[in-house]
Image (spheres, rainbow, N blue to C red):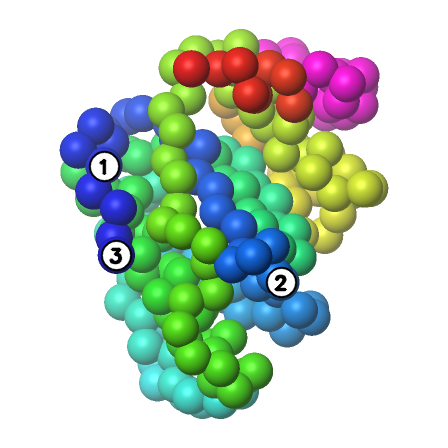
Amino acid sequence: MPRDYKGIVKDNYYHVYNRGHNYQGIFIDSQDYFNLFKRLKILLSLSEHPGNKSHGKGNLRLQPLPKGSFDIIAYCLMPNHFHFVIKQNSNVAISTLINRLFTSYVKYFNLKYDRVGSIFQDTYKAKLVENDAYLSYLSAYIHNNPEEINSEYSSFGEYMNPNKTGICNTKLVLNMFDNNSALYKKFVINSKPLVEYIIEVQP
């Protein structure tokens, strides 16, 4: 069932996350990651809609949301869970983006792997990011999720090369580090022992 976040409002930032049912995989191979990113880009109006062309099994039917409705600040896709930091820029709710994205992805996943039902343990969580300091450590926490921080399935690469076209708005976080990617990388690496504690104790 969709989660009703009455407190989610325009201009706020949220940590959105979920994991697979019984910690099972939600991304099995590279095609799965690709298909999630493809759907996200369509919804964010960052790529041309492919219409109803076949993509593997089934058709991709997604209507893009108004361009600029959201900024993706950071993300990481792991085999059995995901993290996003999202800024809501309009009155289009984050729930609209997340529900459309993962409803479409679950349909793709179930068709590909010949299964039925939800692949997630519960409805997703959306936690308010209340200040810039927490946002910086949250981004470090997300980028430290993979064993190697330069995972192709996280936004860390976009932070290291902010001039490259991607799905993230890296400006807010990098501004905290004088727009210096090397300083940000050092922060991410050095904060690894602290970030899990900081994230856990945040109310």
How crowded is the residue under tag 3: few (<14 C-alpha within 10 Å), some, or many (20+)? Answer: few
Q: Secondary structure at mark 1?
A: loop
Amino acid type of the residue tagged 1 in the rendering: Tyr
**Numbered badge on residue 73:** none
Look at the image and tell me in which quarter the C terminus lies.
Answer: top left
User: Could you give the CA–CA distance between mark 1 and mark 2, rounded to whole angstroms?
Assistant: 26 Å
* In the depicted structure, whether residue 172 falls above or below residue 120: above
**For mark 3, what is the residue?**
1
Amino acid type of the residue tagged 3 in the rendering: Met
* In the depicted structure, whether residue 98 falls above or below residue 73: below
The reply to whether residue 65 is in sight is no
Where residue 74 appears, as percent x and y from the top left, is 55, 36
Residue 157: quarter of image: top right
User: Could you give the CA–CA distance between mark 1 and mark 3, rounded to whole angstroms?
Assistant: 12 Å
Q: How many marks?
A: 3
User: Could you give the CA–CA distance between mark 3 and mark 2, rounded to whole angstroms?
Assistant: 21 Å
Q: Secondary structure at mark 2?
A: loop
* In the depicted structure, whether residue 201 falls above or below residue 2: above
Taking 117 as reference, is 133 left or right? right
Residue 33: quarter of image: bottom right
Q: Where does the magenta region start and end?
A: 176-195
Where residue 80 appears, as percent x and y from the top left, is 62, 55
Q: Is residue 23 magenta?
A: no
Q: Residue at image x 51%, y 63%? A: 36
**For mark 2, what is the residue?**
25
Look at the image and tell me in which quarter the N terminus lies.
Answer: bottom left
Looking at the picture, tell me which residue is in the foreground, 80 or 155. Answer: 80
Q: Residue at image x 31%, y 61%? A: 100
